Image (tube, grey):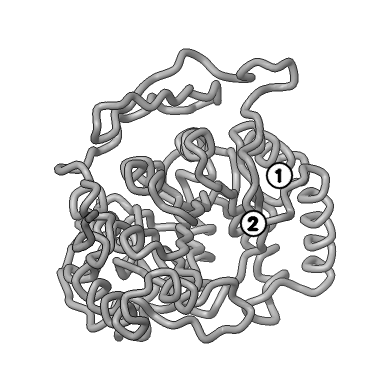
Amino acid sequence: MAHTQYERITTKQTLNRVKEERMPFDWSINPYRGCGHGCSFCYARAFQSFIGMGAEDEFQHHIFMKANAAEALEKQLLSAARKFDHDIEAMRTSIGQVTIGTATDPYQPIEGKEGITRECLKLLAKYRISTSITTRSPLVLRDMDILTRMENVSVNISLNTLNGDIIRKLEPASPHPGGRLEAMRALSAAGITTGLFVAPVLPFLTDDESELKELLSQSKERGISFAMISLLRLSRDVKKWYIETLKNQFPDVVQSYRELYRQGAYAEEHYVHAFKSMAARLLSEYDLSGQSKREPAAITGANGTNSGFSQPFEISDEGGHNLHLPQPDMAGSPKPKKLPQPAVPVSREELMPDIEQLAFPF
């Protein structure tokens, strides 16, 4: 097993402007570079070339931690607040939507120890910034004390298959599907807008319609409000690593991939057309195509009971409150682990803008 190197770096700014007009958010935050989950198909592997590194094993085993991310973020937010004379509502409207985890997972394993994402989340809550989080990890539940106090927040859980064997072979250190499903349930039950990102769908491995239906069905039962389904894109550097991984894990599909992606990063047009048609049909069938905020769906089975669950287990939030998370009855599902807890509970003052802390009644 390769040794993982963690390197602390500093950043000049944590909020980064998103210039792509098609993106549904205005700013991004990525507390880490590289990702311990090690997904073989991850598009962020291609970003390694920007810092003179490769898209191969180094992406998983050399993680850069932006140690001063929270401090840099606070400077940016404080500067923005001053421009609006500390009118927090005007400031948040000007900033728009911030998404955490556009390049690498903000709740990858090292976050359990470092807490960089948590500190950034406190500041976004403090300044009441509209926030969206994308992650593959149930570790996001550690920060329920912050999430439940945010005015406009959503969490997108990435999961492209319920097949634990495929997950282990292509996402070697990412959480089991069962844990991600239960993260959806806990978030939605707490009133947090929760979505499913079926991303990326892997041709010949996770693109079976009946399996995608089961994934959407089980996620809907856990209370998600919307879903997004997107197809695998393979840039040159990522394609090389992914194909090598397939040679070791799923050699029977290697030639099919070479033919399907022979034109470059995108699959052949005939496949893309059929895929988009299927995805739109499935989202419509399960009423998951909208991304507007709505009441969490009922988290029950067809007979009105908690379908497919065994006995519940518990984790405790930082305030000592128990979060009941039923364990799904899935073949090969590991026993749930107790999630790391924050060393210090978040305080009311930490989430209050400075100008409000100075106010007092007459």
User: Helix, strand, or loop for circle 1?
Assistant: helix
Determine crowd level at label 1: few under 14, some 14-19, many 20+ residues with C-alpha closer than 10 A.
Answer: many
**In this view, 76 is above or below 150:** below
In the image shown, does 38 or 182 lie closer to the viewer? 182
Mark 1 and mark 2: Cα distance apart in space: 9 Å
Residue at which label 2 appears: 201
Residue at which label 1 appears: 212
User: Where in the figure is residue 69, as x and y percent of width and height?
Assistant: 23, 70
The number of numbered discs placed on residues in the rendered structure image is 2
Identify the disc placed on residue 143: none
Horizontally, is 286 left or right of 103 in the view? right
Q: Are marks 1 and 2 in contact (CB under 8 Å)?
A: yes
Q: Residue furthest top?
A: 311
The reply to whether residue 85 is in sight is: yes
Q: Which amino acid does label 2 sit on?
A: Val
In the image shown, does 360 or 236 lie closer to the viewer? 360
User: Where in the figure is residue 139, as x and y percent of width and height?
Assistant: 35, 44
User: Which image quadrant for residue 16?
Assistant: bottom left
Determine crowd level at label 2: few under 14, some 14-19, many 20+ residues with C-alpha closer than 10 A.
Answer: many
User: Which image quadrant for residue 143?
Assistant: top left
